[in-house]
Amino acid sequence: MSLVAGVDSSTQSCKVVIRDLDSGHVVRQGSSKHPDGTEVDPKFWWDALQAAIADAGGLADVSAISIGGQQHGMVVLDADGHVIRPALLWNDTRSSGEAEEIVGHFGASEIAKMTGSLPVASFTSTKLRWLLNNEPENAARVAAVVLPHDWLSWRLAGFGPADESELGPDLTALATDRSDASGTGYFNSVSNEYLPDVLSFVLGHVPQLPRIVMPGEVAFTTSAGLLIACGAGDNAAAALGVGASAGDVVVSLGTSGTVFAVSATPTTDPTGTIAGFASATGDSLPLVCTLNAARVLDSFCRLFDVTHDELGELALRAPSGAEGVVLVPFFEGERTPNLPNATAQLHGLRLSNNTQPNIARAAIEGMLCGLKGGLDALLDAGVACSRVFLVGGAANNVAVQKIAGEVFGVPVVVPEPGEYVAQGASAQAAEVVLGHLPNWPRDVSATIDTPGVAQILANYARALNALAAAQA
């Protein structure tokens, strides 16, 4: 039996999945936690990767591995391969002012044209500019800039500081893929080239950057003969893990929400609504992020003192449209649409419709309508959508599945719960062994193909317009 491994090095933890090359069957798996915080010493990721590999039974019988990881995190190395300072993660917002500096310097249209995205505080470029502005001594020491998955792949290949590694600090050996590079803010995923003008502005000089390894190519081979594939950013790996292809849109219901699609056509959005990322297969991966997703349901579960399943049961006792009750779920403000100071609002309540079932349904409809706004932004940019993959913990709720079909108006596919990022990475590992992506079966939990309910969207649009007008 030939085995391959995939890794998900996320914000919260490291997960390793080892699969049979031929069938895709998960043979064994392991995990290890990461520390909390928006600023983390990368050594904790390396320790967690080693612990998760050990928990999964090791790699002695594994032919190839690939690492998917959290995007955007800034890992800066000195000339000896040492990490200069703790990494700033995607969810560290201290560089929001620097994002405005970059836009002011290059112009919104120009920087979006160059990189596919308008920079925001999550992007690596803004964090490098913050480093230059606030820690100029550290900025001057930067010999190389990498992302979390780049650094882990390099370390797993045997590189690193001389006293910690087999092969030493060869910064020219660093490697990444275009999906993760596309989230840095200094890479053009159409030409597959870094942008030295952007790097010079944000850091003050151009450091060593990881070479771009294309899908199917081997990034490293260890002294033990283990092949290491190019890896991917977490969203791109997740799209590969669920089997999304052109015409598919993935809606992920996590703490925040993401809507992204595998598309043959790149997008350029100077408004910042759509991030023009790259996919793990050589295509584009336009992505929209919302701040309010599964936490909306958490809030109403606490309010009604019910479980998520019980909240869903309540919601399905109400009719579509919740008899006119509408929740605009901006509990944490919102990024899409850009209303950072907004609050959640409940509209349309009367004595006759003020019931727990209506409010429970309005919570689910509101959460999904917010994500439908992301889908509409992709459609307006020319992205095709023939079906939606619904993933994340909240996707397993029967009411969420049914209402998603009514809101999105296209067939909704719910994959079996799984480690989608690690599964996508393991498919990359299989590709470097087979010479092509594997044709593994993908288990589906549910497929919902119900007509869209226009009244839900119309009610939500009226409530959203009222909120936006009040914010103006």
Image (cartoon, helix red, strand yellow):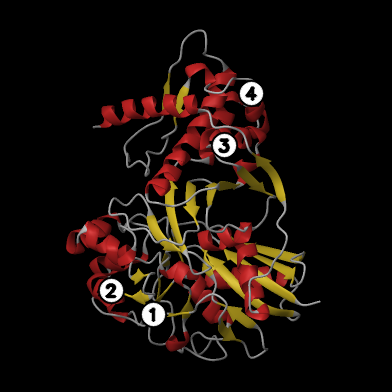
The label on residue 199 is 2
Residue 362, numbered circle: none
Q: In the drawing, does residue 292 fall left or right of residue 55?
A: left
Q: Which label sits on residue 404?
A: 3
Q: Residue at x 48, y 49 (%)?
A: 258
Mark pair 1, 4: CA separation: 52 Å
Dot 2 amino acid type: Leu
Q: Disc 3 or 2, which lies upstream in sequence?
A: 2
The tag earlier along the polypeptide, 3 or 4, is 4
Mark 3 to mark 2 CA distance (whole Å): 42 Å
Depth check, mark 3 against mark 4: the one in front is 3
User: Quick one: SS at disc 3?
Assistant: helix
Mark 1 sits on what residue? 209
Tell me the CA gap for discs 2 and 1.
10 Å
Q: Tell which tag, 3 or 2, sits nearer the viewer.
A: 3
Mark nearest the camera among 1 and 3 is: 3
Q: Earlier in the sequence, mark 1 or mark 3?
A: 1
Could you give the CA–CA distance between mark 1 and mark 3, rounded to whole angstroms?
41 Å
Relative height, residue 220 to residue 369 (above, below): below
Distance from disc 3 to disc 4, alpha carbons, whole Å, reads 16 Å
Q: Name which of mark 1 and mark 4 comes first in the sequence.
A: 1
The residue shown at (43%, 80%) is: 210
